[in-house]
Image (spheres, helix red, strand yellow):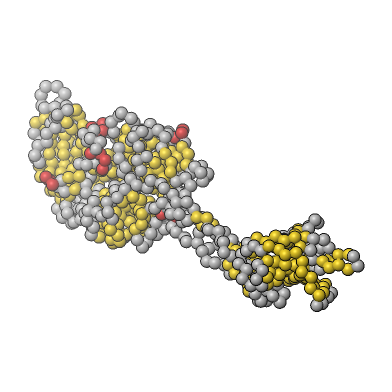
Amino acid sequence: MPLIELPLNKGTGVDGPTSRYIDLYNFNFVYIPKDTDGKAYYLRNFPGVTNLYPAGGKSFAAEYNRELGHEYRIIGRALYQDGKKIADLTKPALANTAHTAKNQAFVDNGTLKFWDGKSVSPIKNWAEGENFVVYPDYKYIVDFDGAGSLAITPYSKDTPFIFNATVDTAFDQDFDLLNGEIGTHKYKLSYIKDEDKFVEIVMNGSTEERREDKGASSDFLSFFLNATYSSNGQDIPIPITRVGGAGSYFKGKIESFVFSDTIRNVTFSTIVEVKRDSSSIPLPPTTRTIKSEQNDNIIAKLDSSLTWVAYKDQLEPDKSEPTNYDLSGVLDVDRHRSRFVFVNKRFFLCTAISQGSENEELIDVEHRPDYLAAESEAQTDPDGILAVRSYNDDALTIFGRNTTEFFELTGSPQQIYAPIRAYKVACGIVATAAVCRFMGEFAAIGSSAGMSPQIMMIKPGQYKAFSTATIDFILNSYTESELRNAHLEAFNKEQHQFLVVHLPNHTFIFDGSTGQWSQLSTGYGRNMGSYQGSHIVYNPEIGHTIAHNGIGKLDDYVSSQNGKIQEHIAYTPLIRLVDEYGATTVKSISFDSIRGHNATEQVCFLSSTRDGYAYQEQEFRIDFNHPLEYFKKTVQGPFGVVQQSIGFKLNIVTGDNLTLSKFLVKA
């Protein structure tokens, strides 16, 4: 029989209890297509791990913040920046982390929190006046000091007229309120304290005519006046030129005064409003002239002793109302355009992008929900929301257990997001961390309603499972409560698009560039278990870093993990050698490797199976790779009698780099 080449990308086995054929996936190997030396591919060890920084505890999240040039990790109950602990946390969640140029956002104790370069702060609702404060204009009024008055454009009328004034002063002394003169004739409206009344007085030299007494009021004055004198049977008007006195002055505040007759009104206000844009009180006005409301050419001038003082009644600032969004129970976060978007079981919410320009107290708006419309609700999944991701920066993706929905920005401040109904997918995810971006789409562990979980690709309007029957079988061996801590992550390395699937007791790795599945593990022999590394991040200053009993980096120069040797397993499929009665023997096997470049001797323990279920206990020990022995060949056999089929398993425990290829069987 000629030489038979068996592929090493995966093996064929049997699950005895369920009587089914299953795939046997290699451990700690990467399938690398390469047409060289008569081979179409070879297996190379998955990169080892070299420790960089100490850190203790479970890894929850990691991201390289290109805006700030720092790598952030959440391990245990601490936040790390470039390998150094910078903050203590309470109860981190296995969730996404996202960043802007100012903040690194993550989930801790059911709350969205931010690292701003100095401290950790939680998201908060807007407090009263925190978004904006509109300050009304500040009012000033002329203060009549008892030593001066207003000189007005002369007002004269040869018939009686009405004078109204609003006064904010109790009258406690004699004073003149109005004064005027023409020639030898003078006019004044005076308050007489002892009589508690106003009187009109017209004087001509030493002659004084006292006219009708007027009642007094401390707030609103209204008088029917006659500022005239009689000459040759004709009433001659005496122009009013002063308000506030001339010789005997008013002391206090006159808010406004009006001269009214049958033809016109002349109105003055001594209150001036000064623009105010902060909590500071603006400076008083500098003007010394008050214009009438009807005619800019009719004015009142302040005597030098009069000043502007604060008016007694000032309007309160108009403060923005506080918000009352439910910010608890946060499960996940991502960045979409210029906002952080985070989810709880019922809603997805977004952070603000601006603060009212009228507020002098600047805050980091990324630490606040959008003021008007932060909250949106997914439409179709009654089981609630589990995760959020931005899709190519165009749409926002909300993952539920049974449905995935896509939303777009509306451009309206009243409704920030609206669903893209044509994009909706009848498939959801099993856990918050069970989804990640992968090859321009989303890879996830999930299913449609009522179906068992698979590993699938999700994109707008479509989903497709790509896990194998064997992986589905393993997934279905877990309950959904056990899958709540399932975690998917993706990274690219040397033209490989890797997807790592972390399950409670298994770690699978899928290479999207080749379509090959394999497994990752930590340890060897009876201590071999699921892979201990997670959250692989590309750091442009270091390379690919990883949380693995501390913070380390993927190291192409070793296969060890933190200095400890690891077990690598490769399987071949079952090959049928005998179809009828009888038997045959396997005379020899051989395989290739890149030899001589390792630092230590490498030994392969080769086992065989006749049924795909039970493997012989390390039938052969093969020394196949020695330092500096570049041309060593590996041929082993015979393997005894084969009645029907045979398959092989190769176990190699090493800390050096390792390659396998071209496994040949001679029967």
Left-right relation of 264 to 38: right
Give residue 35's quadrant in the image.
top left
Relative image position of residue 172 (x, y in whole percent): 61, 71
Relative vertical location of residue 383 with respect to residue 595 in this rendering, above or below: above
Left-right relation of 270 to 153: left
Q: Quadrant of the N terminus?
A: top left
Res. 6 in view: no
Q: Which of the pair 180/377 is nearer the observer?
A: 180
Res. 395 in view: yes
Give residue 55's quadrant in the image.
bottom left
Q: Quadrant of the C terminus?
A: top left
Relative image position of residue 460 (x, y in whole percent): 43, 36
- Which residue is depicted at the point 41% across and 37% down? 378
Q: Which of the pair 645/182 is nearer the observer?
A: 182
- Which residue is depicted at the point 28% across and 58% down? 88
Q: Which of the pair 490/511 is nearer the observer?
A: 490
Relative image position of residue 280 (x, y in whole percent): 52, 66
- Which residue is depicted at the point 23% across and 45% down? 520
